[in-house]
Amino acid sequence: MGLLRDALFHFEQAAQAGNIDAVRAIAQVRQQFGMESALNPAQQAFEALQRADSFDAMQQAVQQFPILSQMILAIEQVIEQQVPPGSSSRV
């Protein structure tokens, strides 16, 4: 278990640096080995949303973690405030 804990430590550092793949890896390893998550509820909710691979899975994540609804509304508000009306999202 020592090597696994070392790997999780490094994955957690990468996740804190913004590596999305590391966040997924942490969740997968913890789930496979039945380990409790050290993440706070908002992080757990975000991980559940990231693992969702279909619309139904996203809905289940929102049902399991109601905080996701609040987070989505907050993101929408920020976008409305930051993106000028009529602007294009072309890249």
Image (tube, rainbow, N blue to C red):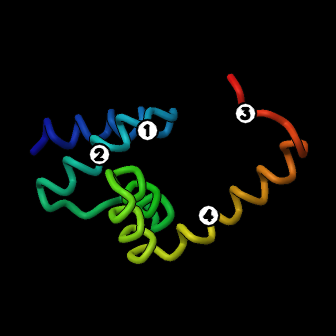
Q: Quadrant of residue 84?
A: top right
Pointer 2 or 3: first along the chain: 2
Q: Which mark is residue 60?
A: none
Local packing at callout 1 (Cα closer than 10 Å; few below 14, some 14-19, many 20+) is: some
The quadrant of the rendering that contains the C terminus is top right
Asked which secondary structure carries label 4, the reply is: helix
On the picture, is 41 further left or further right than 6? right
| Residue at 37% from the left image edge and 43% from the top image edge | 23
Nearest the eye: 2 or 8 = 8
Q: Which residue is mark 1?
A: 15
Name, please, the residue furthest toward the top: 91
Residue 8 position within the rendered picture, expressed as x and y whole percent measured from the top left:
27, 41
The quadrant of the rendering that contains the N terminus is top left
Local packing at callout 3 (Cα closer than 10 Å; few below 14, some 14-19, many 20+) is: few
**Can you tell which of label 4 and label 2 is closer to the viewer?**
4
Residue 43 position within the rendered picture, expressed as x and y whole percent measured from the top left:
46, 58
Q: Which residue is mark 3?
A: 89
Q: Are marks 3 and 1 in contact (CB under 8 Å)?
A: no
Local packing at callout 4 (Cα closer than 10 Å; few below 14, some 14-19, many 20+) is: some
Marks 4 and 2 sit apart, C-alpha to C-alpha, by 22 Å
Q: Which residue is mark 2?
A: 26
Q: Which mark is residue 71?
A: 4
Q: Are marks 1 and 4 in contact (CB under 8 Å)?
A: no
Asked which secondary structure carries label 1, the reply is: helix
Nearest the eye: 49 or 84 = 84
Q: Is residue 86 above or below residue 75?
A: above
